[in-house]
Amino acid sequence: MNWRVPLFRVSAAPWADLEPALKRVAESGYWAEGKEVEAFERELREFTGHPHLFTTNCCTSAIAIALRALDIKPGDIVVLPTMTCVATAAPVVALGAKVLWCDVDPYTGLMDTVRGLINPTGIPPRAVIAVDWGGDVAPISLLAEWCRRNGAALIEDAAQAIGTKTTGADFRCFSFQAIKQLTTGDGGMVLARTQALADFGKRLSWFGIDRRKFRTPTGEINWDSDIPNVGFKANMNNVAAALGRVHLRHLPGRLEAARANGHFYERAFADVPQIRVPQRHGESAYWVFTMTCEKRNALAARLQAKGIQAGRMHARIDRYSGIPRVDERRLTGTDYFAEHVLCLPCGPWVTPDIANEIANAVRAFYGHRFVGVGQRAAGAVARPGIVKRLSQTLRGGKPDGKA
């Protein structure tokens, strides 16, 4: 369907910016990984402030490389939430590991550190994959502490969270897929905890080859060069990197626009009792605006009738029979979130007028009066950035501890 206001959109830079970059690579005669990728990685280090990174051909490859670098083997247990794209689990399955589903906070969709990491098998997991749902970052510092106590590695699936900062994960994996805020057509990036992990991951992204030693100064293959750990064909190429370098210049403005929309929605919905705006663990990238609400399906249908693509974003992936799992326990937080989550368009194509239209359509659905752009919702208590609406973990099996 051709939505008037889509949930996702390819945000391409103007052709006047893209043409010289693509022409530069096309005429260079070198389209594979080379100087363009090196330049893009330097610029990403400056943007992220993180020195230990490398690029890949997609985020799924980034997660696969992280798992391999952490020596995840067939039969190992990897913990992850079901509220994510199947791409989070695909590398786990490909490596022959088993999935232990964890629960999520019922109002944020983020990994629940109180209950979600309980392992009924008694077998310690080798790794945990935390997912930054919709650009909202998971409680990484708390998860990292749990992983340290239990001898597990931590991978952060930050596919939707470019422009955010966390500490504690062994690897943060990002997506530069077509509809992400920073796009290379398709691509990914890995932020590693140490330079040694970054160097190892970089080698794994290109068959396990150490490019610094693989060829002689004349360009011939160094016949004495070894490949001790055979990896993947998962490196980025110069064409993708050229696109990424252009879009990286536009990224701050896109993030600023998305965050302005997210903060506006937070103010607009803060006084609506049928909506829960989640407490966020630091600044969000607001790839979408996530909330939980009553009569979710009816509200989504009302917005969709107006040409506004509001929806659930992802189906829970524990329904897929092709994912080997450890147990089938009830995930009560996930059950609630899956039945109540609604994602609203939040990207830079959502102008202030459109954001106002969406907010007022939602408020009208629940019988609340209209508000204007930049105004405080009636009765709302707002502060810059994040509205203080505390989400609560499940107690007694239901939200808010209610029987």
Image (cartoon, rainbow, N blue to C red):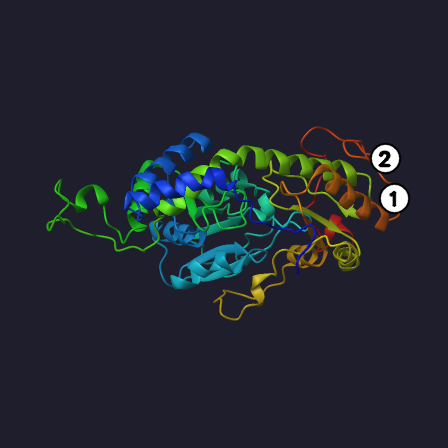
Pick the residue in front: 250 or 261. 250
Q: Quadrant of the N terminus?
A: bottom right
In depth, the one of 21 and 395 nearer the eye is 21
Look at 75% across and 48% down and name the residue there: 400
Residue density around tag 2, few if under 14, some if 14–19, many if 20 or more, within 10 Å:
some
In this rendering, is residue 328 above or below 358?
below
Residue at 72% x, 52% y is: 308
> For the C terminus, which image quadrant?
bottom right
Asked which quadrant contains residue 28, the reply is top left
Visible residue check, residue 19 = yes
The location of residue 225, given as percent across then percent down, is 14, 49
Q: Which residue is mark 1?
A: 368
Q: Determine whether label 2 and label 1 are within 8 Å by CB.
A: yes
Q: Hey, what amino acid is under mark 2?
A: Ala
Q: Secondary structure at mark 2?
A: loop
How many numbered tags mark residues here?
2
Q: Which residue is mark 2?
A: 378
x and y percent of residue 65 in the render? 37, 51
Q: Is residue 164 visible?
A: no
Amino acid type assigned to the residue bearing label 1 in the image: His
Q: Camera-side residue: 184 or 275?
A: 184
What residue is drawn where x is 42% and y is 30%? 46
Q: Is residue 345 left or right of residue 294?
A: left
Residue 181, position as x, y percentages in the image? 54, 43
| Disc 1 residue crowd, few under 14, some 14–19, many 20+, Cα 10 Å | some
SS of the residue under disc 1: loop
Which residue occupies 64% across, 43% down?
349
